Amino acid sequence: MSDKPESSKTRLEEHLIQPFFQKDFLSELPEEVAYRIIAYLTPSDLTSGRIVTGYRDRYNHDALRVWKIDDAQPAFTINGHMGYISTFQVSDDGNYIVSGANDGMVRVWCGQTGARLHVLQGHTSTVRCMSLHGTTLVSGSYDQTLRVWDLVDWKCLHILTGHLGMVWCEQFGGIRVVSGASDGTVKVWNVQTGECLQTLTGHTDAVESLLFEPERDLVASASLDATIRVWDVRRGTCIAILLSHQRYFYGMQLRENRLVACYAYLDVGVWDIRDGGSCIHRLQDVNGHTSTITSLQWLDSGLLVTGSDDGLVKLWDVDKGIFVRVLVRLQSGRSGGRVWRCRLKATETLLVCAVGLQNRTGDTKLILIDFDASYP
């Protein structure tokens, strides 16, 4: 439970929630249904940044669409992969867009024009995940390896080998990268030397999601064995095992000693990782989502935003474990509603949504929602 005074908490919630009562911002949505909540962005992001979304063109080819934030219009489209685009990243400075696909290629694009800068070859199977830090890129593949790339000289600096199964996920902290694979192991690597620093064992099925806090030497790994394990990577020991009734996870966030995990079905778990781990709340009641939860973001205020295939974005109080209200309610077309991803940064009053058909075909629309703007 929150240790803040109730009056302060109430005032905070009123400050955050009141704008949502005042603005009927989605009453006239087109028939296309939401498939991705893209970002919560700072004002500077909104005036200077761009957003990248995946979509499928009229020839049924996967591509990337880059949007201008100032007028919510497409800036350009990126084509070039011969297969399904499985992962992509945008550099912090916006200069690079990097994408990986099931053709085994990693392609680097100019973030300003969409021009192809380079093709990084070496993986022999699907590029499943990637992390970008400065001009260093780490890509993980179903070929059981990770590769460390220099985006200045376009060289492969290291090939990280040791997993005995497909690499499913990774988290890059700048010097160390953590990877999880279908062999059930979590490995910690030094990207500067290519050395494997730790192999963390204990999961009995594939590791599909990771969270890495390098400052505290903590890693959380979610597995198809229906557990989340929290590790002290400096010592190589498991400090908490969080038991779940679900096998699939769509994301985790850790703040101090509390971990929030989004299950792929209908609820979100709130855990205390101390003393071996214990479940504090499950955010699912009569006000819960009615379809797969695919996204979450824990705000600095202590409130949690979740997005779901049911086309709803909801707000929860993590401290109390209670539902607060629906933020977005999208019309459901013939394909059903989908909110694929929710990323929130810095401000709790700006929201960017990409709206399109569930199967990523047809036109995609970008909706910018400023809860502080005058209405209409």
Image (cartoon, rainbow, N blue to C red):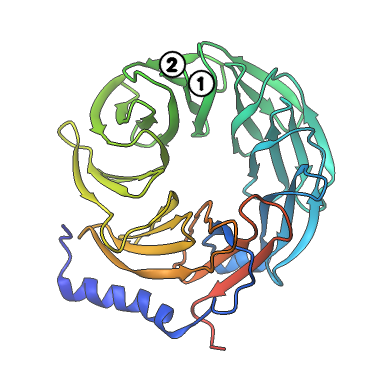
256 w.r.t. 370: above or below = above
**Helix, strand or loop status at disc 1:** strand
Asked which quadrant contains residue 202, the reply is: top left
Name which of mark 1 and mark 2 comes first in the sequence: 1
Q: Position of residue 112 (x, y in %)?
A: 78, 53
As drawn, is 83 to the left or to the right of 224? Answer: right
| Residue in the picture at 36% in, 64% down | 315
| Residue in the picture at 38% in, 45% down | 265
Asked which quadrant contains residue 248, the reply is: top left
Asked which quadrant contains residue 256, the reply is: top left
| Residue in the picture at 15% in, 70% down | 5
Q: Position of residue 170 (x, y in %)?
A: 51, 30
Q: Quadrant of the C terminus?
A: bottom right
Q: On the image, numbered disc 1 is attached to which residue? A: 190
Q: Residues within 10 Å of mark 2 (few under 14, many from 20)?
A: some
Give the camera-side residue of 225 and 188.
225
CA gap between label 1 and label 2 equals 7 Å
Badge 1 vs badge 2, beta-carbon distance below 8 Å: yes
Q: At label 1, which amino acid type do we have?
A: Asn
Q: At label 2, which amino acid type do we have?
A: Leu
Q: On the image, numbered disc 2 is attached to which residue? A: 197
Q: Position of residue 167 (x, y in %)?
A: 54, 22
159 w.r.t. 175: above or below = above
**Helix, strand or loop status at disc 2:** strand
Q: Which mark is residue 155?
A: none
Q: Quadrant of the N terminus?
A: bottom left
As drawn, is 375 to the left or to the right of 277? Answer: right
Give the camera-side residue of 329 and 240.
329
